Amino acid sequence: MGTTAPAPCRAFVTGHDGAAPMRTQVGIVGAGPAGLMLSHLLHLRGIESVVLEVRSRAAIEATIRAGVLEQGTVDLLTATGVGERLGREGAIHHGIKLRFGGRTRRIDLHALTGGKAITLYAQHEVIKDLVEARLAAGGQIRFDAKDVSVHDLDTDAPSIRFRQNGRAQELRCDVIAGCDGFHGVCRPSVPESVRTEYQRVYPFGWFSILAEAPPASDELIYTCHERGFVLISTRSPTLQRFYFQCDPHDQIANWPDDRIWQEFHARLENQEGWRLIEGPIIHKIIIAMRSFVCEPMRHGRLFLAGDAAHIVPPTGAKGLNLAVADVVVLARALAGFYGSGRTDLLDDYSQTALRRVWKAQHFSWWMTSMLHRSAEASAFDLRRQLAELDYVTSSPAASTALAENYVGLPMEL
Ligand code: FAD
Ligand code: PHB
């Protein structure tokens, strides 16, 4: 970027409809983990932002998504003052289990990474904490912002147009952060001629349930079985999150509760005497699996972050964590821009973020291919997968590689 940083300015809260457009420093599209965390980090550095979110506050605070926070994500939330409830209610896990060939082996994350761990804390709880912190600090989050569109991206004065309460409004800013997820409007606003998209769509999905039951295990269990993958996770002492591999085109209506439990029992139980505890199923959803990266993650004054720029299959538990890692890099670059007019960090944003993104892509693809059964797989493939799992869980070098990726690689700045 070849310009100097504009002076700080206050965002007007009034709409426009012919009146003066609103103005802020950083216009953020999307109040997911990426958008809210960016707004929070910018506030701590004295930079103003306005977040525009298409859904209501109640809707974003109720959407069931991720559950695993890397050590670095937990440390960041804590260090920036939004980790109080996470510290109280999050469950720290020092290991995960891999189940295959009728046996279960533990990866000791803590021992293999010099004391790091993961924390189980639902994404919508992170969202609630960030929304509360932003609003308490006087931050602006415009919920129910419809028909959002981004303009003048290749100028020093980009703008965001939207409708709220039926009124057309415009937000002028210095920089736009596209944090609007995979189906948002920001990435498609980058001309096709200047973006390259890399994609792999997997021939399977995850059937996901929330069940009111006590925990099935003290640690997550990733299972590779002839009938397909299963993941045993948790949300609280009374609510459990389980997933099994399914056809991505399958229908929830094909899976009454009894059939779901039968499938879990068939894939999970072995000679070790462990039994899954059933309970009322209160939520069912089928999730498609894809790997996707858009390069570069920046076009003019538009910076993409999180799922807007990349998607990973959930097997590595990386999506939310990557979104947070992106905005750490972006917030630092914006601090350099506003603090001393330097533009080099913004110029490097895409390259810096993509280094971590591609490592997470590799890890997520690797975990997915090691643990899932594909319809075309032969008996040879199953034996090869079992050998890989045997190696990964018995070689200190291979277990360490899994562990250091799972707890999260160091943040790159
Ligand atoms: P999003 O969370 O998608 O947020 C984007 C926001 O933008 C949304 O609130 C959306 O309403 C809003 N928006 C969209 N379009 C517009 C528009 N036009 N105008 C205004 N606003 C708009 N990740 C992990 O790290 N660990 C896990 O354990 C994990 N498990 C997962 C399990 C499941 C079942 C799924 C589906 C995902 C999981 N993920 C996990 C991935 C994680 O949930 C996502 O990567 C994460 O939500 C990305 O955050 P984001 O802020 O980039 O995007
Ligand atoms: C979850 O708890 O939702 C979860 C855990 C681990 C994953 C994916 C999702 O790999």
Image (cartoon, helix red, strand yellow):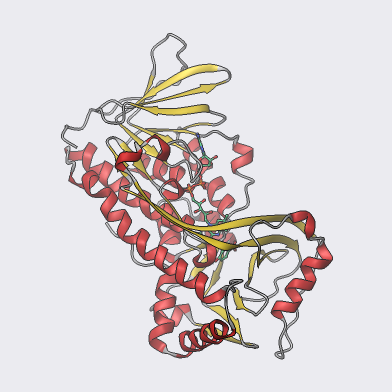
Pick the residue in front: 309 or 171.
Answer: 309
Pick the residue in front: 212 or 162.
Answer: 162
Ligand 2 shows up in the quarter that is bottom right
Does 167 appear above or below 102?
above
Quadrant of the rendered image containing residue 221: bottom right
Observer able to see residue 27? yes
Pick the residue in front: 378 or 89.
Answer: 378
- Residue shown at 32%/54% (left/top)? 353
Quadrant of the rendered image containing residue 228: bottom right
Does 4 appear above or below 258?
above
- Residue shown at 27%/56% (left/top)? 413
Q: Quadrant of the N terminus?
A: top left
Does 106 appear above or below 289?
below
Does 303 appear above or below 395?
above
Residue 355, position as x, y percentages in the image? 30, 60
Classify residue 348 as left or right of residue 147: left
Residue 264, position as x, y percentages in the image? 73, 73
- Residue shown at 49%/55% (left/top)? 83
